[in-house]
Image (cartoon, grey):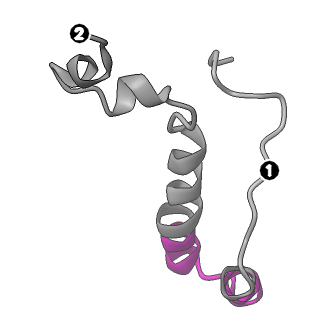
């Protein structure tokens, strides 16, 4: 198992995405199913894998930034 993958992953669907999934299931269209997986589920999985917490000082640090906060 990949280190960052949890035992279970929950993916939320908007109402539009839910109905699109239902449409794919009813039509049994393989091409639509693949597009749904790539365009909707694939994007959601990438969002889950991206880091969420980045310390403020790392994300926005610029050289010389601390100088204006040091007492002289």
Left or right, 41 with reference to 14: left
Residue carrying label 2: 72
Asked which secondary structure carries label 2, the reply is loop
Name the image quarter holding residue 53. top right
Q: Nearer the viewer, residue 32 or 72?
A: 72
Q: Residue at x 49, y 76 (%)?
A: 31
**Magenta span has 22?**
yes
Most extreme residue toward the right is: 8
> Reading the chain from its start, which is encountered first: label 1 or label 2?
1
Q: Residue at x 56, y 63 (%)?
A: 37
Asked which secondary structure carries label 1, the reply is loop
x, y (%) of residue 3? 64, 15
In this rendering, is residue 8 above or below 64?
below
Left or right, 45 with reference to 70: right
Look at the image and give the residue range highlighted in magenta: 19-36
Left or right, 62 with reference to 14: left
x, y (%) of residue 35? 48, 72
**Cα separation between marks 1 and 2:** 52 Å
């Amino acid at each position: 198992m990949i280190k960052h993958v949890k035992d279970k992953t929950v993916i939320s669907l908007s109402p539009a995405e839910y109905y699109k999934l239902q449409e794919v299931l009813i039509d049994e269209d393989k091409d639509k199913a693949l597009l749904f997986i790539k365009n909707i589920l694939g994007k959601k999985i990438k969002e889950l894998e991206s880091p969420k917490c980045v310390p403020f000082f790392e994300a926005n640090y610029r050289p010389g930034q601390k100088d204006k906060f040091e007492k002289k």
